[in-house]
Image (cartoon, rainbow, N blue to C red):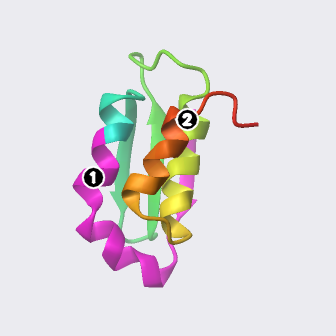
């Protein structure tokens, strides 16, 4: 499964600046494959064979979307810790 999260122009520079802080929890904790697509100005998330949690893709999308809405990376990480948000 894949998800694409569009990045608004005013959040693309902060995304580049904080990319390591955004990328690390997605790969280490959720076991997702992540890439930034600068041409389409989006972040693409994909499950891998190592992904254990079924809701990992949704959590990852919510995390990136929270950052694009203006939340700090540390505040958005709290979304990854919550279970059954919906």
Label ID, residue 30 = none
Q: Quadrant of residue 32?
A: top left
Viewport quadrant of the N terminus? top right
Residue drawn at x 37%, y 44% as measured from the top left: 34
The magenta segment: 1-24
- In the image, 8 versus 2, the foreground residue is 8
Left or right, residue 75 beside residue 83: left
Measured from the top left, where is residue 31 in percent x and y? Answer: 38, 27
Q: Which residue is mark 1?
A: 21
- Disc 2, SS: helix
| Above or below for 14 versus 77 | below
- Label 1 secondary element: helix
Q: Are marks 1 and 2 in contact (CB under 8 Å)?
A: no
**Left of 86 or right of it: where is 54?**
left
**Badge 1 density bin: few <14, some 14–19, many ≥20, Cα 10 Å:** few
Point out which mark residue 57 bears: 2
How packed is label 2: few (under 14 Cα within 10 Å), some, or many (20 or more)?
many
Give the dominant element type of the magenta stretch: helix, strand or loop: helix
Report x, y in % for residue 54.
60, 21
């Amino acid at each position: 499964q894949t998800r694409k999260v569009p990045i608004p122009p005013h959040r693309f520079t902060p995304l580049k600046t904080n990319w390591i802080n955004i990328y690390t929890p997605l790969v280490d904790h959720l076991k997702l494959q992540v890439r930034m697509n600068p041409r389409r100005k989006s972040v693409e998330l994909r499950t891998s064979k190592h992904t254990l949690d079924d809701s990992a893709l949704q959590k990852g999308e919510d995390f990136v979307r929270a950052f694009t809405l203006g939340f700090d990376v540390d505040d958005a990480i709290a979304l990854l810790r919550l279970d059954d948000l919906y």
